[in-house]
């Protein structure tokens, strides 16, 4: 009699365990389905964002090429009395600064573009002087920086500019994170070791 009661108790415990296991497996299937659905929605949003950014780049290329054609078709004025004075070209020994960066720097801030002497320096302990990149991804922010710079930039330069624009990096190798992100995105191309440029810049040069 004791053995029968023990067996009945164990069988009841087994049924409860199996029922709990089945409930958890059903819940797991629901979570996996929901996770897969969310991944599909994220991929769709990423594709939509990429198409929108590509359209923006194409429009910018068209606007720039149209502006250059209009400037090339404008006849030169010969009236010396009303002719606008030509801007003085910068001296060769004076580095040309991008005004989009200059207006965000304080008089005592660090110069984020190193001289032409090999690999640019990655500056440590940079203080954010704006929050323009605080809510952007690495690829979005780098697209803006490369477009503003008008030339390829090294990952060290991109890192300095991203941090100064309010972006925060949690990993120990932020420049590697930047390089990996740009390598995976078809909007960018590597022109030199650690140096990237926009693919659409080539189209802009051809159009001009």
Image: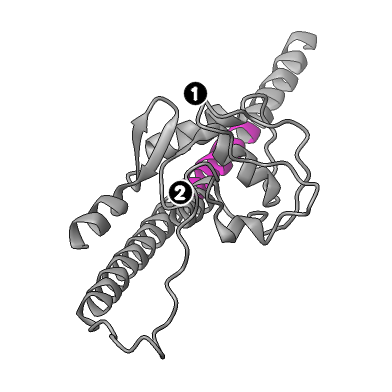
Q: Residues within 10 Å of mark 2 (few under 14, many from 20)?
A: few
Q: Which residues are magenta?
A: 20-36
Q: Position of residue 141 (x, y in %)?
A: 54, 52
Percent x, y for residue 78? 28, 85
For the residues labelled 2 and 1, the Cα–Cα distance comes to: 42 Å
Q: Is residue 151 above or below residue 14?
A: below
Q: Main secondary structure of the magenta part?
A: helix
Label 2 sits on residue = 39
Q: Which residue is mark 1?
A: 118
Q: Using the rendered view, name the quadrant where residue 21 is placed.
A: top right
Label 1 secondary element: loop
Task: State which mark lies toward you, 2 or 1.
Answer: 1
* Quadrant including the C terminus: bottom left
The residue at the point 36 percent across, 28 percent down is 192
In this view, 122 is above or below 103: above
Q: Residue furthest top?
A: 3
User: Is 196 in front, or is 78?
Assistant: 78
Q: Residue at x 52, y 47 (%)?
A: 30
């Amino acid at each position: 009699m004791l053995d029968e009661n023990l067996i009945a108790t164990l069988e009841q415990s087994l049924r409860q365990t199996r029922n709990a296991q089945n409930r958890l497996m059903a819940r797991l299937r629901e979570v996996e389905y929901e996770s897969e659905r969310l991944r599909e929605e994220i991929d769709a949003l990423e594709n939509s964002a990429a198409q929108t950014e590509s359209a923006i780049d194409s429009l910018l290329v068209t606007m720039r090429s149209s502006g250059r054609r209009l400037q090339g078709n404008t006849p030169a004025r010969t009236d010396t009395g009303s002719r606008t004075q030509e801007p003085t070209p910068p001296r060769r020994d004076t580095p040309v600064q991008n005004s989009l960066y200059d207006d965000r720097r304080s008089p005592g801030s660090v110069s984020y573009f190193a001289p032409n002497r090999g690999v640019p320096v990655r500056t440590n302990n940079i203080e954010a002087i704006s929050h323009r990149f605080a809510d952007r991804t690495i690829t979005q922010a780098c697209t803006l920086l490369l477009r503003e710079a008008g030339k390829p930039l090294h990952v060290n330069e991109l890192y300095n500019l991203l941090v100064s624009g309010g972006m925060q990096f949690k990993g120990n190798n932020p420049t590697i994170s930047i390089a990996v992100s740009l390598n995976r995105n078809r909007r960018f191309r590597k022109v030199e070791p650690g140096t990237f440029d926009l693919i659409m810049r080539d189209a802009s040069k051809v159009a001009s």
